[in-house]
Image: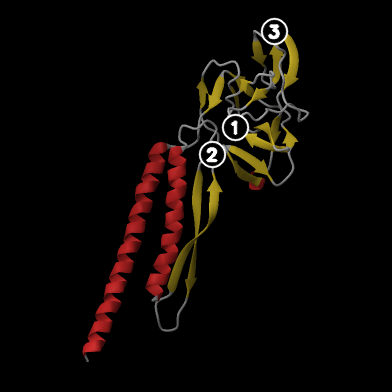
Amino acid sequence: MTDAISVSLTRQSGLLQELSVIANNIANASTDGFRREAAVFAEFVRELPEQASASMGSLRGHYTDLSTGTMRKTGGALDLAIEGAGWFGVGRDGDVLLTRAGHFMLDNEGNLVTPMGDPVLDEGGAPVTLPPNTSEISVGPDGTITADGFGVAQIGVLSAEAEDLVRAGDNLWRTTGALRFEDTPRVRQGFLESSNVSPVEEMARLIETQRLYEAGAALQTDEHERIQALIEALGRN
């Protein structure tokens, strides 16, 4: 395998993974609270004696854009969004996970849960539970829940360091570091935070990445044909 093909294959592998990342972003453009990802490439350049330098690019990781999405008014009593920093706490298998998707509902026991059935946690880490037959639910900016005029719970709004966040699936995150409570949370009732994916920008990235991938494939084909022609020429001599 020649240096040209080796370099191209390394780049192609990274571009294929970037295409997967972009496709996932586009698929989640309408997912509430979703955070877009981007691929991070690195380039290694080595100087060769009496030759042009060799350059090799490869995928080195992924970057998550944690900027907030736009607020969309729904009017739903249990649709909640956080303005600024912070995450809703969600319990799953004994762990505290984080989400920005605030489309919640009540289960048969009156627990506030996500669409997947995971309990939403209060400021003490316990599931938020509302009294049975509650007719009017109000949520204050600090996350305090009032049921028929009586305060019953306060939704926990948590913070974590960006570098400690890891995707946990189902639009949830876990942190490898410490969790802390937001001192001045800003919760909005009747709103949902949209995904921060821009479909137009992602489509532009998709087209650009596809063209780069096709260019690499063409380079490999040309190099293969060059080597084949050389071998055939040597065989005739």
List x then y, in percent, for residue 31.
50, 32
- Say which of 78 and 190 sits in front: 78
Q: Nearer the viewer, mark 3 or mark 1?
A: 3
- Say which of 131 and 162 sits in front: 131
Q: Nearer the viewer, mark 3 or mark 2?
A: 3
Residue at 38% x, 72% y is: 4
| Residue contact at pointers 3 and 1, CB within 8 angstroms | no
Residue 98 higher or lower than 162, as above or below: above
| Residue contact at pointers 1 and 2, CB within 8 angstroms | yes
Question: In the figure, residue 223 lies in which quadrant?
Answer: bottom left
List x then y, in percent, for residue 165.
64, 44
Mark 2 residue element? loop
Read off the residue under disc 3: 148
Read off the residue under disc 1: 100
Question: In the figure, residue 54 lies in which quadrant?
Answer: bottom left
Q: Please state, as top left, top right, bottom left or bottom right, where the C terminus lies in the image.
A: bottom left
List x then y, in percent, for residue 108.
66, 19
Mark 1 residue element? loop
189 left or right of 94 in image: left
In whole angstroms, how far apart are the C-alphas of marks 1 and 2?
Answer: 9 Å
Q: Between disc 3 and disc 1, whose residue precedes?
A: 1
- Say which of 47 and 26 sits in front: 26
Q: Between disc 3 and disc 2, whose residue precedes?
A: 2
Read off the residue under disc 2: 35
List x then y, in percent, for residue 151.
75, 13
Q: Residue furthest bottom?
A: 237
| Residue contact at pointers 3 and 2, CB within 8 angstroms | no
In whole angstroms, how far apart are the C-alphas of marks 3 and 1?
Answer: 26 Å
Residue neighbourhood size for the residue with mark 1, other residues' Cα within 10 Å, grouped as few (<14), some (14–19), many (≥20): many
Q: Please state, as top left, top right, bottom left or bottom right, where the N terminus lies in the image.
A: bottom left
11 left or right of 147 in image: left
